[in-house]
Image (tube, rainbow, N blue to C red):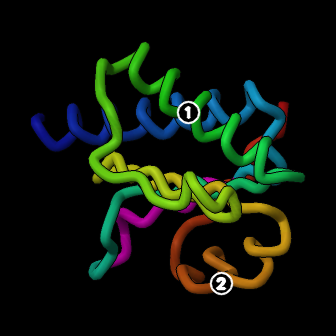
Amino acid sequence: MIKKEKTTLVEKLAQVVVHGMQEKKAHDITLLDLRNIGSSVSDFFVVCHANSPLQVDAIAKSVEEEVFKAFSQESWRKEGLTQGEWVVLDYVDVVVHIFIAEKRDYYGIEDLWADAELIDIKSA
């Protein structure tokens, strides 16, 4: 019963992250379900990209605001806000990756975690 409850909360957190991305018109939002991968570092990765560093920053702020509104939770760690090319927001069970388009192609997060179930989300 506890495991089911945790899964529901983690899935809800991932949905809230997606909503925050959609609010700022993030592109190609992809949810990577890592729960069936034995050595995964998290339950979900949520990946998207933006057209500019300014939009990367806006998406990151929107995700943080939506998660805080829903769960009163701040990210455990956040990196990349000063460069605006790849921002990582770590909510432990859900890790958010917001790229500028060129960096997303270069790093290929989806390819690195090819064993994960990929769920493409409709952009706003």
Q: Quadrant of the C terminus?
A: top right
Q: Which mark is residue 124?
A: none
- Label 1 amino acid? Val
Q: Please provide percent x and percent y for residue 18.
A: 62, 37
Say which residue appears at 67% left-offset and 82% top-offset: 107
Say which residue appears at 42% left-offset and 66% top-offset: 34
Label 1, secondary structure: give it: helix
Say which residue appears at 22% left-offset and 38% top-offset: 6
**Label 1 Cα neighbours within 10 Å, binned few <14 / some 14-19 / many ≥20:** many
- Label 2 amino acid? Asp
41 up-or-down from 26: above or below:
below
Q: In which quarter of the view is residue 55 placed?
A: top right
Q: In the image, which is nearer the foreground, mark 2 or mark 1?
A: 1
Q: Which residues are magenta?
A: 30-37
Q: Badge 1 is on which residue?
A: 63
Number of marks in the rendered image: 2
Q: Badge 2 is on which residue?
A: 111
**Label 2 Cα neighbours within 10 Å, binned few <14 / some 14-19 / many ≥20:** few
Asked if labels 1 and 2 touch by Cβ distance under 8 angstroms, the answer is no
Q: Quadrant of the N terminus?
A: top left
First of labels 2, 1 by sequence position: 1
19 up-or-down from 46: above or below:
above
Q: Please provide percent x and percent y for residue 83.
A: 64, 61
Specify whether residue 36 is painted magenta. Answer: yes
Label 2, secondary structure: give it: helix
Q: Please provide percent x and percent y for residue 65.
A: 50, 22
Q: Is residue 50 left or right of residue 45?
A: right
Specify whether residue 33 is painted magenta. Answer: yes
